[in-house]
Structures are given as structure tokens and as C-alpha cells.
């Protein structure tokens, strides 16, 4: 028991206490909400969203922070208000029934009012006090109290009374939002009631540029607290207001090292064989018709196969069209849609300003919590804004996804001219992985080629690959790299054919030469045989001649001797020396 | 016939002067004065109103004083924000007169009455 008593309470903070608004993004800008127990002035032109701001402030307070609220409407009737709030997804009727909210419509018309002397606004005080007491309210919205100036006489009294009212609300410790019409840019409110609100002033703005409207919010003043001073775009849609705070101020995203497949085997191969890093941002850029969507669809398909959730922002095609077109290359995404793993969000980029798109993206992403987000194509958004805006939006988007560890796939259409390539390069500095698709025109046809322009934090191939859209998805082929440069498609095939033919020819030529040599050898050998035969023949003849001539010589000598003997005619020297001897020999 | 005349002159700015057959319309004027506690302003308003009614309505009136501190819901139901407010129920509309009723002429305009003299 004593321990319970001892329960240390944090020392009363010297800092200003703040009341969370629950409005997306606003609490970040203001560092925790509006000043608690004090009035805040929300000023803006007609249609800038003041009433919605007030309503959401109360509804969030009642539903999320257990702070019931009172809405004093000086303009709209309660049925109108309820209807308008329903468009933001707020069920005022239920909150009122649950005693979490009290709506009061202050209606007075000048024609019914006659002023006959001094008056005060005690009636209004009593009404507010009663309403606050009925629901135990901690928050009050006065929308738009300046309307009283149009209906009650004697503005002097009215001003004093309004000042007294603000003081009274502050004394009661009610966190109050006072809306005011801003009709001139040099003044915050029409009747200068900002003098009475010294704590916090927020200005809402609704401007149109190039036919596209953008809402912006700025915290002009916040006494006793630091706050973001920029103009922040905001959006009102079926989930209320979302203010887009600047991108995360620091660069402290987590850096996962897990690698996931792109769904294209050879593309994984080009990325060191393991695919892309989870949580990275991927840019698939290329001219029209190069297959950007197909690459994205592969990545989506692969992710869904792994059971991951994917969110696909289609700014060019309707979801059905994408499903049909991807089916034609053998990627059936429909089962994933049915399983709830894949969700499409399709909208024309001209539907809203770039901030609106960004906010919508945030909204859908935070609602769906996907592992992969595809923005197809991101360039369409840029076409409705300046380059600077587009870049800042992309930075925010990339940052946002990174903090959540979501892999972002952006397709980007490039026109192919140099100027565009430089923009693309601008964008690509934000990206971790840039896949460049190219259409190569050679030999009267266009073929697709893919290369990895950059891949942070992983080894990647520097090669250009041809990729072909088949009935079973993307197939990647080596391109022909030869003396004539990079060839793809038919040119590659015909070049390969030509090479083959040339090879055959050369081989045939070689074979032919070999055969010729053989033949020559045969001829040579034949000639050799012939020559030898001739020679032998001649030799024989000659030998024969020689031997013949020898024998005939001998015979001749013999004959002569015989003849001499027979003749006995002469016994000369000749006889003595030679023939006689020869004869003798014989 | 009388009714048409009344409705025709409901707007506060009417400058039409002579209105003798006023009394026939409401048999008795129902007047309601909203106050918030006993403030000097409220007391002044009540005093002014009593004098004025005695002078112009001669008994054909009834004043009801409502303290909104005791009946805050009536402020809402009757769209009262300024104090004091005098509410006059006319057959076709409710006229409100705010302030301490020190400007008698304007009260009479609001009451759709003009000083006889």
C-alpha cells in the first residue's frame, strides 16, 4: 500500500503540455499536438478545410484519446455537419449517442434580432458550459465564431465578449480550436480575433496551380514550443485529414541484407545470383514499350509466390488491363489479387496534385503494409508538377518506404532524349538499384535489352542482356557481341547464322585443300612410279646394249683372229702383240 | 384582415407609422426575458421592460423571466446567446431583442408596436 503511494510520478514537465490531435502528420509537425488547455486559431479561406480540421480534432480526441468534445457550429446545421463528417468516415451520430461528442448549432439571424442596449454573450457561455458538462468535454471547437459579427450588432461589445470567451475557455482548461475565415492574405482573420489567441495559430490554404488543387497547412505560431515552420501539403479524404510531414529528417533507415529474387532467373544472375536487397528502392527505366511493367510484374509475382504482400499503384493502366496484359506473357496475377496478397490502386495522375498522390500512397501503404510497392510509372506523376516537386515527392516516398523496410519498385518512362536522361539520372541517385531497359533498333526491327545501371551494395553484371517476352514470361538471352557491336533479335540470329555459314565454308575450304593435297600426292606418286618404270626400262635397254656391244666386240675380235688365222696371211706385230695373244687366250 | 397586416410588417426596419389595430392580434403579449443570474444588466432590462409594458400594453402581457443558469438547455433550444434577450412570440415568428432594453424605441419596433404618442 505504501508502495502504491510511493509510485513516483514524473516531475511535472516544465514543457508545455500538448493534446494530440490524432490528425495524421500534424502531431509530428507540432511535436505532439496542440497546446493542451489553450485555444488554437485555425484560419483559412473558404473551403480550406477548417471545419473538417475541427471535426477531426474532436472525433480523434473522443475515439483515440478519451477526451470528449463539444462542437459549436456557427454556420452549418447539425444535420449538414453530420453528413459532411460522414464523408470523412466519422459517425457523429454514434459519438453523440455515446456521449463522447456534443454538437450545438448556434443560429441567429439578424432579421430577428434587435439590439436595444448593452448585452453580453453569457447565453453562449452557458450553452458551452452546459455542453462541456454533459459529455465531460476536454476539447471544444468554435466554428466559426466570427460569424457572429455578421449577425449581432455592436462589434465593440462582441469583440470584448469573444476575448472574454477565449479567456474563459482557457481558464476552464479546455483545448479549443477556433476557426476563422481568412479573406485577405495580409490578415489572418476577417475581424482580427487572432489578437486574442496567442498560443497557437495554424493557417490552412487551398490553392490551385495548373488546374490542380493543393491544400497546405502551416503552423504560423506556437508559443512555447518548437514546430515545423514549412508549408505542409495535406489532404482530406474518406479517412480524414492527413498532413504530410517532411521526409524523415535523418537518414537512419534500417539496412537489411536479405536478398530476394526478382522472379527472372537471369536477372538474379546479373545481380550476383541472389536478386535485390529487401527494402531497397528499384528504378526500372526505359522508353515506352520496353517492358517496364513486365519486369515489375515479375517482381510482384515472385513476391506473391513467397507469400509477401504487394501494393501496385497503376497510373497508366487499369488493374484489369494489367492483369490481362500480364497474362499474355504468362504471368497470372489474378490469384494473388483474390488471395489478398496483391492490391491495385489505380488513378489517373491528373486526379490530384502531387502531394495528394503522395498522401494517398502513404495512406494505402500504411493501411496495407506491403512488402513491395510498385509505382507504375512514377514519371506520370512528375508530368503534373515541376521537376523540383517531383523530386522532393520521390525523395519523401523513397524515405517513407525505406523506414518501413518496404521494397519500392518505380518504373520510369524515359523519352530517350539527353535532357530526359539527365532527369532520370537525378532520380536515380535516390535509387539503390537501377535497371535500364532499352529498345535497340537494328536491321529494321526493335529489340529489348536490359542492363543494370547501378546496384548499391551488391556485385552486378555490367553486361547488356537481350530480353524477350515469351508466353512464359521474360527470357533473357546473351546479346551478340562481335566486331559489329551489340546485336539483338533477328540481327543477332542472322549474324549467328552468317557466322555459322562462314565457318562451314571455311571448314569446307580446308577439307577441299586437304583433298587436293591428297590428289597431288597421288599424282606425284603416280608420276614417280611411271618415271621409275621408264627409268628401269631405259636402264634395261642400256644394260642390254652394253652387254650386247661387249659380246659383239669380243666376237668381232675372235672373228678377226680366226679370220687371220684362217687366212694365215700375215704374222705382223699386230699379230704378235694382240690378236695372236687374244687368240691364244681363247 | 388584421393578420395580413401583421405579417406584412414583421421586418424590423419597417417604417410604416400608424398601427392602431395592434392589440387584436395577440390577446396577450407573451414575453420571455432570458437572463443569467442576477446581474445589473438583467435587473435593468427587467425594469425597463416592465415600465414599457405598463405604458404600452396595459395589462395585456405576461413576462416570463428565465434564468439560463438554472435552465441551460433552454439557451440551446431557443437559440439564445446574448444576455439579456427578450423573446417575443408573434403569431408567425419569434422576435428577439437583445440588450438591456434601454433604447425604448427600438424595443417597440421589435414588439411591432410604435409609441402611440
Image (tube, rainbow, N blue to C red):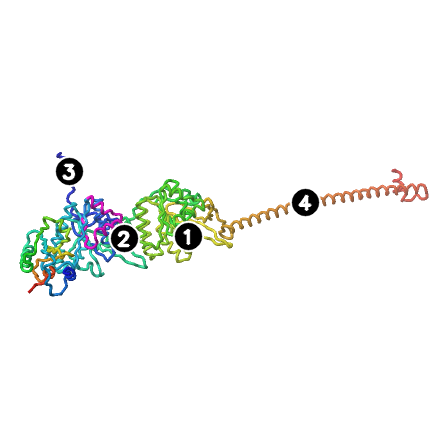
Q: Is residue A110 above or below residue A36?
A: below
**Label 1: element kind:** strand
Say which quadrant the N terminus of chain A sits in: top left
Q: Nearer the viewer, mark 3 or mark 2?
A: 2
Q: Is residue A44 above or below residue A543?
A: below
- Label 4, on which residue? A521
Q: CA distance from mark 4 to mark 2?
A: 95 Å
Residue neighbourhood size for the residue with mark 1, other residues' Cα within 10 Å, grouped as few (<14), some (14–19), many (≥20)? many
- Label 2, on which residue? A234
- Label 1, on which residue? A286
Q: Is residue A87 magenta?
A: yes
Q: Is residue A182 visible?
A: yes
Quick check: marks 1 and 2 in contact, CB under 8 Å? no
Q: Position of residue A284 (x, y in %)?
A: 40, 50
- Label 3, on which residue? A7
Residue neighbourhood size for the residue with mark 2, other residues' Cα within 10 Å, grouped as few (<14), some (14–19), many (≥20)? many
Q: Earlier in the sequence, mark 3 or mark 4?
A: 3
**Label 2: element kind:** strand
Q: Is residue A277 above or below residue A234?
A: above
Q: Nearer the viewer, mark 3 or mark 4?
A: 3
Amino acid at each position: 500500500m505504501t508502495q502504491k503511494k510511493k509510485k513516483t510520478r514524473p516531475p511535472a514537465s516544465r514543457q508545455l503540455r500538448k493534446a494530440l490531435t490524432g490528425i495524421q502528420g500534424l502531431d509530428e509537425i507540432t511535436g505532439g499536438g496542440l497546446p493542451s488547455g489553450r485555444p488554437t486559431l485555425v484560419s483559412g479561406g473558404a473551403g480550406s478545410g477548417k471545419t473538417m480540421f475541427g471535426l477531426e480534432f474532436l472525433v480523434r480526441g473522443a475515439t483515440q484519446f478519451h477526451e470528449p468534445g463539444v462542437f459549436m457550429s456557427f454556420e452549418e446545421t447539425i444535420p449538414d455537419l453530420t453528413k459532411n463528417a460522414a464523408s470523412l468516415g466519422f459517425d457523429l451520430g454514434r459519438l453523440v449517442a455515446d456521449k463522447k461528442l456534443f454538437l450545438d448549432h448556434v443560429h441567429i439571424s439578424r432579421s430577428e434580432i434587435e439590439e436595444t442596449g448593452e448585452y453580453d454573450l453569457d447565453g453562449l457561455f452557458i450553452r458551452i458550459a452546459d455542453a462541456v458538462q454533459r459529455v465531460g468535454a476536454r476539447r471544444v471547437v468554435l466554428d466559426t465564431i466570427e460569424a457572429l459579427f455578421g449577425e449581432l450588432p455592436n462589434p465593440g461589445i462582441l469583440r470584448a465578449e469573444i476575448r472574454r470567451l477565449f479567456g474563459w475557455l482557457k481558464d476552464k482548461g479546455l483545448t479549443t480550436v477556433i476557426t476563422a475565415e481568412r479573406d485577405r492574405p495580409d490578415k489572418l482573420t476577417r475581424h482580427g480575433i487572432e489578437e486574442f489567441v496567442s498560443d497557437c495559430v495554424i493557417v490552412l490554404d487551398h490553392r490551385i496551380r495548373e488546374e490542380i488543387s493543393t491544400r497546405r497547412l502551416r503552423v504560423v505560431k506556437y508559443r512555447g514550443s518548437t514546430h515545423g515552420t514549412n508549408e505542409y501539403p495535406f489532404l482530406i479524404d474518406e479517412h480524414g485529414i492527413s498532413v504530410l510531414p517532411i521526409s524523415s529528417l535523418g537518414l537512419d533507415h534500417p539496412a537489411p541484407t536479405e536478398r530476394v529474387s526478382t522472379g527472372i532467373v537471369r536477372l538474379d544472375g546479373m545481380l550476383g545470383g541472389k536478386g535485390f536487397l529487401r527494402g531497397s528502392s528499384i528504378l526500372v527505366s526505359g522508353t515506352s514499350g520496353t517492358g517496364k511493367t513486365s519486369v515489375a510484374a515479375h517482381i510482384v509475382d515472385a513476391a506473391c509466390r513467397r507469400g509477401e504482400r504487394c501494393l501496385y499503384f497503376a497510373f497508366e493502366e487499369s488493374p484489369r488491363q494489367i492483369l490481362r496484359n500480364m497474362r499474355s506473357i504468362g504471368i497470372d496475377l489474378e490469384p494473388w489479387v483474390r488471395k489478398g496478397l496483391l492490391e491495385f490502386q489505380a488513378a489517373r495522375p491528373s486526379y490530384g496534385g502531387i502531394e495528394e498522390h503522395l498522401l494517398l500512397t502513404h495512406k494505402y501503404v500504411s493501411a496495407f503494409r506491403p512488402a513491395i510497392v510498385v509505382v507504375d510509372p512514377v514519371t506520370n506523376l512528375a508530368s503534373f508538377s515541376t521537376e523540383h516537386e517531383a523530386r522532393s515527392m520521390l525523395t519523401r516516398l523513397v524515405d517513407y518506404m525505406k523506414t518501413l523496410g518496404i521494397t519500392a519498385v518505380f518504373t520510369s518512362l524515359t523519352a530517350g532524349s539527353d535532357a530526359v536522361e539527365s532527369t532520370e539520372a537525378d532520380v536515380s541517385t535516390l535509387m539503390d538499384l537501377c535497371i535500364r531497359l532499352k529498345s535497340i533498333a537494328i536491321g529494321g526491327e526493335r529489340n529489348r535489352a536490359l542492363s543494370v545501371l547501378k546496384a548499391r551494395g551488391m556485385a552486378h553484371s555490367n553486361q547488356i542482356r537481350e530480353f524477350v517476352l515469351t508466353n512464359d514470361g521474360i527470357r533473357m538471352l546473351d546479346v551478340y557481341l562481335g566486331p559489329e557491336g551489340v546485336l539483338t533479335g533477328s540481327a543477332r540470329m542472322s549474324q549467328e547464322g552468317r557466322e555459322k555459314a562462314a565457318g562451314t565454308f571455311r571448314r569446307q575450304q580446308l577439307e577441299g585443300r586437304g583433298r587436293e593435297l591428297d590428289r597431288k600426292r597421288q599424282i606425284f606418286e603416280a608420276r614417280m612410279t611411271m618415271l621409275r618404270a621408264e627409268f628401269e626400262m631405259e636402264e634395261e635397254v642400256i644394260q642390254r646394249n652394253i652387254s650386247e656391244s661387249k659380246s659383239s666386240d669380243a666376237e668381232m675380235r675372235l672373228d678377226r683372229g680366226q679370220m687371220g688365222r684362217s687366212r694365215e696371211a700375215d704374222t705382223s706385230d699386230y699379230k704378235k702383240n694382240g690378236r695372236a695373244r687374244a687368240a691364244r687366250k681363247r | 384582415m388584421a393578420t395580413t397586416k401583421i405579417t406584412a410588417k414583421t421586418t424590423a426596419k419597417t417604417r410604416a407609422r400608424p398601427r392602431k389595430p395592434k392589440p387584436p392580434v395577440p390577446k396577450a403579449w407573451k414575453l420571455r426575458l432570458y437572463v443569467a443570474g442576477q446581474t445589473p444588466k438583467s435587473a435593468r432590462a427587467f425594469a425597463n421592460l416592465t415600465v414599457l409594458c405598463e405604458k404600452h400594453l396595459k395589462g395585456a402581457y405576461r413576462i416570463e423571466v428565465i434564468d439560463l443558469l438554472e435552465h441551460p438547455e433552454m439557451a440551446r433550444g431557443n437559440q439564445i446567446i446574448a444576455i439579456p434577450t427578450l423573446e417575443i412570440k408573434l403569431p408567425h415568428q419569434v422576435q428577439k431583442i437583445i440588450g438591456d432594453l434601454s433604447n425604448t424605441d427600438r424595443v417597440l419596433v421589435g414588439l411591432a408596436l410604435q409609441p402611440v404618442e
